[in-house]
Amino acid sequence: MRNALGKTSLVAVVGSGAMGAGIAQVAAAAGHTVKLYDTRPEAVQKAIAGIRKTFGMLAEKGRMTPNEAADAGGRLMAAGDLNDLADAQLVIEAIVENLDVKRQLFADLEKVVAADCILATNTSSISVTALAAKLALPSRFVGMHFFNPVPLMALVEVISGLGTDAQVASRIFDTAIAWGKVPVHAKSTPGFIVNRVARPYYAEALRLLNEQAASVATIDAVMREAGGFRMGPFELMDMIGHDVNFAVTQSVFSAYFNDPRFTPSLVQQELVNAGFLGRKSGRGFYRYDDGSKPEPV
Ligand code: NAI
């Protein structure tokens, strides 16, 4: 791609959870050296080990050569602190969905990286304009919103805030194509495109459950079989993580001046309170702890 980041450009990923690990995998497979950082060093180690294992499995299936898998795995590096990211040409943030925490991270990053380094956020819902507003160089700030699981989901929303330079957005758009993705431009509105359209899908399913209209498993099965969705709403929320999904709903609700259409669910709030975050914690609307087929709780 004409305008894409060159393969020799170093990509940094901050936050090495589900999304950060997936983004790092895609960037390394596309030929970049990738540095991963997380406030929990064990998350970085887990992500790198997991991605290398995945590359090994792809080689076994013939979808990469063994050399390609070894090379891509070798391009992943752990960063001990933010200063290690000084030589990055693109930083993609995938940390907790919280405006103040993300803002602090980008303020810290701006002290470390070069003036031409692009700063990107994988936020699901927070205003890209607001995240950029306090930066010295808001023009280099853009949303690069991947979907879960990143290696399998083609779509990337490239989100421009009011201060984003059009060249920066187009560079990220072309980079997404070079990484095998299908990007779409979007403006910084609450939830952007997909998370906006998806809010009523989750909300109505949660309301149906509240009204005891049908069970979790029945609603999921109906949406799969009759709705043609790959996953039902409860399966999908369990995969996304209730902490993340609830934070996104709160963010959209608040950004829309508490529009009742986006009211967060008390059922989901209780799941978060209990630490039943979905697949990642072994329990959400389903149980995953024994490794067998998920069972409704
Ligand atoms: P996660 O909980 O799996 O991972 C977040 C990671 O960030 C954790 O390892 C945590 O230790 C780390 N972290 C937290 N604060 C940090 C900081 N200040 N500096 C460095 N590391 C920090 O979360 P997940 O699911 O990967 O989501 C991350 C971001 O991606 C959120 O903004 C979320 O809204 C967005 N997102 C999530 C999707 C999903 O389906 N889970 C889909 C698309 C976007």
Image (tube, rainbow, N blue to C red):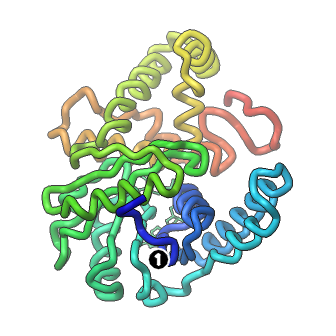
Tell whether 85 sits left or right of 101.
right
Provide residue 142's location: percent of width, then percent of height. Answer: 29, 61
Q: Position of residue 289 (x, y in %)?
A: 76, 45
Which image quadrant is residue 109 in?
A: bottom left
Q: Is residue 241 visible?
A: no
Count the numbered circles shown. 1
Image position of 74 (left or right of 160): right
Does the closest atom of ligand 1 sit within 8 Å of the Cβ of label 1?
no
193 vs 147, left or right, is left
Number of other residues with Cα within 10 Å of mark 1, as a class: few under 14, some 14 to 19, many 20 or more: some
46 vs 261, nearest the viewer = 46
Query: Residue at 38% of width from left, 61% of height from top?
Result: 2
**Residue, x 19% and y 70% (percent of image)?**
138
Determine the residue positioned at 59% across, 27% down: 231
Quarter holding the C terminus is: top right
- The quadrant holding residue 58 is bottom right
Quarter placement of the N terminus:
bottom left
Q: Nearer the viewer, residue 64 or 53?
A: 64
Judge by depth and name the residue closer to the eye, 242 or 76.
Answer: 76
Q: Secondary structure at mark 1?
A: loop
Is 209 placed above or below 76 here? above
- The residue that disc 1 covers is 9
Q: Quadrant of residue 199?
A: top left
Query: Can you say whether 168 is above or below 245 in the image?
Result: below
